[in-house]
Amino acid sequence: MGRLKTVERSGKRALLRVIGLFLRARPIDAAEFRAMVFQRILVIRQHNQMGDMMLAIPALRAIRESYPDASIGVVSSTLNRGVLVNSPYVDRVFTYDKRRPWTTVTMTSDIRAQRYDLAIVLHTVSFSFTSLLLAVLSRARIRVGSTSRSIGHALTGSYLNLTLPLPDDAALSRLNEAEHNLFPLRAVGITTNDIAPLLVPGDASERWADAAAAEHWRGETLRLAVHPGAGKVANIWPPQRFAAVIDDLAAARPVSLVIVEGPRDAQSVADFQRACGVAGAVVRGRPITDVAALLKRADLVVCNDTGVMHVAAAAGARVLAVFGPTDPFRWAPRCKNLRVVRAPGGNLRALTPEAVSRSAREWLGTSSAGSA
C-alpha cells in the first residue's frame, strides 16, 4: 500500500472513530437476531471488483433462501450493477458512483424511502469505511456486518448492532471465496448449500446475443470466444499464446471467433490479433449482460482469471480459464461449467500453449484433434 493510501485510510479510521463516539447502536447477540423477522433487507457491497461481486452471489442467494418473502436491495458500484439487475436474489439495485460523490445524497434518500429494517455490510477481503457509513445513513433498524478486527474491533461496535465473525488465516486457507462471503452470515443462520455463481442476462441482452451470434459465428464451425486481457497485469497470459491455442484448435476443424475486449484490454487484443491466424469479431463497449448472453452461446470461452471469466461461468458458458499467481482453489467460482489450467508454480510464462490446447480439446471432447 502506497504512503498516500496509508494516510488516507488512517484519516478515514480516525474520522469514523470520532463519528462513532456519537452513535449508540444497541448491541444484540446471534440468538436475538435469529428470533427477529425482517421484511426489507439492504445489502451493502459497493466494492468495484467484478470478480469479487460474482463470488458474493452465493451470499445473496443465502439471504433470499433465508428470507424468501423479503424485499432485498443491494448497494453496488456502477461497474457491478449489470450483474445484479436481473438476479432472482435482488429486488432493487442502488448505484454508488464513487466518481460522482454528489449522487450519494439522492441514493441515500432513495434507500431511506424503502425503510429497510436490516442492513448487512458484506465485506471480506478488505474493510470498507464507506459501507459502514452507508449502513448508518440507511437508517435501517438493525445493522450487522463483518468484524473489523484487522483495524480494531471497537470500530464496528459503535456502528453495528451485531458484529459477525470472519475466519482466521488457517480457516481461510481452506475456503473458496464464495464460502468466505458466507462465513459471517452462517454465524446467524443465513446459509445455502449452493455456492455456484449466477448471472441472468435478461431478455434484451438475450435478443441482442441471438443476433450477434448469428453474425459472428458461422454455420457448423466451432464457436470460440477468447478474452486475452485482464484488469490485473499479473493475471495476463501472453496474448500470443492464446493465439497459438486458437490456431491449434482451428487446425483440427473450422472455427469462428469472437474476441472480448474490456476497458483495459486494447493492447492485449491487438497483440492477440497480430499473432492469431483466425480473424475474429471484436466485441467491445457492450453492457456486461450482453457479453454474458453472447458468451454462453459459445462452444468454448478461453480466458484469463478475470471478471469476464466469472461472468461467463455465472451465465452458464463452457469456460477454460488460465490461472497464474492467483490460487484457483480460493478464487475460481465453483461451478461444473468451468475448468482451470494453472500455470506451473503460478508463473504464467511457464505455461505452454500446448498444455492449454490439450485441456481445451479435452473440454470439447476432441482430445485426438490438433497437435499434442
Image (cartoon, grey):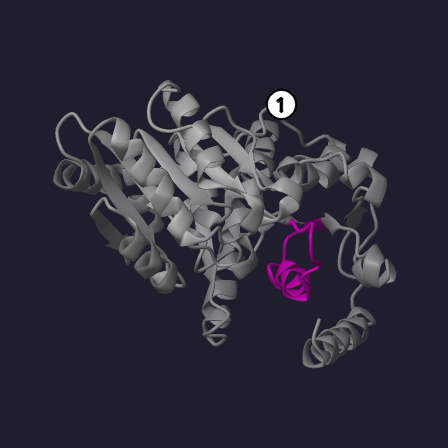
Instruction: Looking at the picture, tell me which residue is in the foreground, 296 or 74.
Output: 296
Identified at 87% across, 61% down, the residue is 154
- Spot occupied by residue 93 in the image (x, y as percentages of width and height): 45, 51
Q: Could you tell me if residue 342 is visible in this image?
A: yes
What's under tag 1, amino acid-wise?
Asn
Q: In the rendered view, tell whether residue 286 sits above or below residue 254.
A: below
- Spot occupied by residue 278 in the image (x, y as percentages of width and height): 23, 44
Left or right, 281 with respect to 185, comes to left
Identified at 70% across, 76% down, the residue is 2
Which SS class for mark 1? Answer: loop
What residue is pinned by disc 1? Answer: 193
Identified at 46% across, 28% down, the residue is 359
Instruction: Looking at the picture, tell me which residue is in the foreground, 181 or 30.
Output: 181
Instruction: Looking at the picture, tell me which residue is in the foreground, 334 or 106.
Output: 334
Q: In the rendered view, tell whether residue 288 sits above or below residue 35.
A: below
- Spot occupied by residue 303 in the image (x, y as percentages of width and height): 42, 43
Q: How many labels does the image show?
A: 1
Q: In the rendered view, tell whether residue 202 sits above or below residue 125.
A: above
The magenta span reads 121-144
Left or right, 64 with respect to 3, comes to left
Q: Could you tell me if residue 198 is visible in this image?
A: no
